[in-house]
Amino acid sequence: MEKFQPRNDVVEGGEFLPRPAYRPRFPARAARPRGFTFVEVTIVAALSLMLLVFIQSFFSSGIRSTLKGTDTLESIRAASLLFAQIRKDLMACQSIQTGAASVTMGVNALNLPAAFPVSDLLTFCARNATTTYSLLTSPRGKYILRTFTPTVGPTETKTFGIPRVKAFEVVQVKKNHRILSTILSPSQLLVNVVIDSDDPRMPTKEIRLSSVFISQQMYNTNWNYFFP
C-alpha cells in the first residue's frame, strides 16, 4: 500500500503551495438527536406529581390553620361586644331574672357543682324598661338577640352574630359568706358563650367564653352591715 506523502509543491519564486485539506472518502453522517424514552417520561411525571401533592398539602394546612385562628379571634371579639352590652344593662337594671337557673354554693365551697341548671334567656328589669337576651336559630345559624322593651315607645332589637356560636348559657350563682353569726348570699351572674363547629373542613375543640358579673343590683339588701 502506497504511503500518503504530503505535497510540497514549489512555485516559481520559492513559495510553497498550500497543502490540500484531507477529506475522508466516506463522510460521517450527522448524529441523530436522541429523545426521551417512555420510562424516563413516566419517572419524571411521577416525581413532579409527588412534589405538587406535597406543596398542595403544605399550603392547605397553613391556610386551614390561618382560617381557624382568624375565625376564633372573630368569635372572641363578637363575644366581648356582647359582654360589654350585658354589663351596661346590668348596671342600669333593678332586678335580674334567669328562670330556674340558679345555684347556691356553701361557705366552704370553692367550685361550682359538676352539674347545674342553665338558661338561654336573660332578663333585666328596670323601672321603665325590660331588656332580654335570648338565643335564636335562623337558616344561616344561631345568634343572640337583645330586645329592649320600654314602657312607652317602640321596641328596639339588636343582633349579636357570634361566629359558630352553639349555646348561650346564664346562671345566677349565690355564694354564702359567713360574717360572725350572719350568713350573706350575694349573687353573681355567670354568662357562658359556647363556640363550636360542625364543619369538617375546620375541625376544632369546643371553646367556652365566660364572664362573671357582680353588681349591687344582685344583692338581697342595700344595707351596709356593721359588726362591732
Image (tube, rainbow, N blue to C red):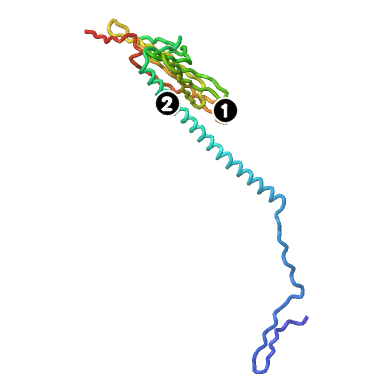
According to the picture, the residue beneath numbered tag 1 turns out to be: 199
Give SS at disc 2. helix
Label 1: how many Cα within 10 Å (few below 14, some 14–19, many 20+)? few
**Quadrant including the N terminus:** bottom right
In the rendered image, the residue lying farthest to the bottom is 13
Frontmost of labels 1 and 2 is 2
In the rendered image, the residue lying farthest to the top is 181
Residue 201 placement (x, y as % from top left) = 57, 31
Give SS at disc 1. loop
Residue at x 70%, y 86% (from the top left corner): 7
Tell me, for residue 158, which label it has, or none.
Answer: none
Residue 52 placement (x, y as % from top left) = 61, 43
Residue 137 placement (x, y as % from top left) = 54, 20
The amino acid sitting under disc 1 is Asp
How far apart are the two marked residues, 1 and 2, measured between alpha carbons? 25 Å
Work out whether mark 1 precedes mark 2 in sequence or the reverse, and give the earlier one. 2
The amino acid sitting under disc 2 is Leu
User: Count the marks: how many?
Assistant: 2
Residue at x 72%, y 65% (from the top left corner): 31
Comparing 208 with 133, the one in front is: 133
Comparing 173 with 98, the one in front is: 98
Comparing 157 with 176, the one in front is: 157
According to the picture, the residue beneath numbered tag 2 turns out to be: 81
**Quadrant including the C terminus:** top left
Q: In which quarter of the image is residue 89?
A: top left
Residue 167 placement (x, y as % from top left) = 50, 20
Q: Quadrant of residue 209?
A: top left
Q: Are circles 1 and 2 on residues that touch, CB within 8 Å?
A: no
In the rendered image, the residue lying farthest to the right is 1
